[in-house]
Amino acid sequence: MNCLRAGVSEYLELRRSLGFGLKKDEGLLLNFAEFMERRHAAHITAKLAVKWAQQPESTDANYLAGRLRAVRSFARYRILSDPRTEIPASDLLPRQRSAFRPHIFSEEEIARLLAACLQRRRGAKPISRWSRYTIFGLLSVTGMRVSEVLNLDLEDVDLDCGVITIRNSKFGKSRLVPVHPTTCDILKVYRKRRDEFLAGRVVKPFFISPLSCRITHSVLDRSFLRLSRKLGMRGLSDTTGPRLHDLRHTMAVEVLRRCYRAGADPERRLPALSTYLGHTHLNYTYWYLHQNPSLMTEAMARLQHRWETPA
């Protein structure tokens, strides 16, 4: 079975050379290799793959399907060196279509959220308020991923040229994000307050915590959860509700909505929006059209207008 474990390492190395992270898949596949070793199984079979995938006592069908997907992907690679490998069919543990819809923030909600960021909290340092305010605002106007904003270093934010450089983001991609002059002005204010707080100390991250280090995703999520409850966007005990990532969805939807209202062709704008957002495929950008009822209404109105009988 050491052969199978070595195969997992080779598979991960190959996929990572193509730009995939596969951190989650690595843990799953190493666990699968251990499972196979305990059973002295030399070859992947669909029966064993399904048995392993169903080991966790989980009622989440998509979680179990995701476990099997990791093995299925590896099995496609493994069959090239071991023809006796069986590739599990995708309908053995099928994924269930999610009814999830992101929360699309209104302009009023975003304004309230930003105002709440600046409110003083007992014991909190001013830099904490300004970091949250600037991060949430930047997310809302650029549609950047939360991780991309938090990973920004000082050298990545060129406020003279109005360009943010995102390095090694999802799938190992890097890209340039031009920002509006008004956004640059806010970022300049933050940088000034940041420098005053640091008092000559040099730190790498652009956005810093009161400890002068990079802000973590979990800390930012907790801050957003507290503010969204305070503003009545979710109940005190709600496990679901608006997410920080929904600011990215909101930005994309608003861009497409403005295209419709201006009479522009969203189909022609989608490739540019896709590049700006850092999507690896245009289909991911089309998702915003399909998931938002208001955009579908705009699209239907355009089609109906196109087929109106001329007077």
Image (cartoon, grey):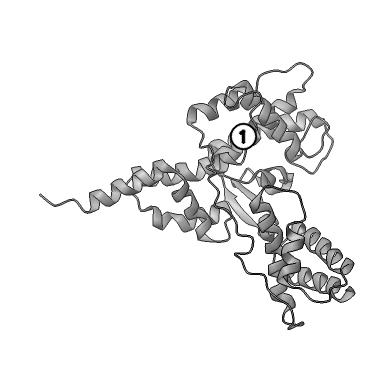
Q: Name the residue located 34 percent from the left edge and 49 percent from the top edge.
A: 299
Q: Name the residue located 45 percent from the left edge and 50 percent from the top edge.
A: 290
Confirm whether residue 267 shows in the render.
yes
Q: Amino acid at mark 1?
A: Thr
Q: Position of residue 307 (x, y in %)?
A: 21, 54
Q: Which residue, as the protein is rendered here, is positioned at the far top? A: 122
Q: Position of residue 202 (x, y in %)?
A: 83, 39
Q: Quadrant of residue 242?
A: top right
Position of residue 92 relative to residue 270, above or below, is: below
Which residue is more in the foreground, 31 or 216? 31
Position of residue 306 relative to residue 100, above or below, is: below
Q: Position of residue 152 (x, y in %)?
A: 71, 46
Position of residue 84 relative to residue 74, above or below, is: below
Which residue is under mark 1?
240
- Image quadrant holding the N terminus, namely bottom right
Q: Quadrant of residue 225?
A: top right
Q: Position of residue 178 (x, y in %)?
A: 56, 48
**In the displayed structure image, the side of residue 228 where residue 282 appears, left or right:** left
Confirm whether residue 18 shows in the render.
no
**In the displayed structure image, the side of residue 32 where residue 257 appears, left or right:** left
Which residue is more in the foreground, 224 or 85? 85
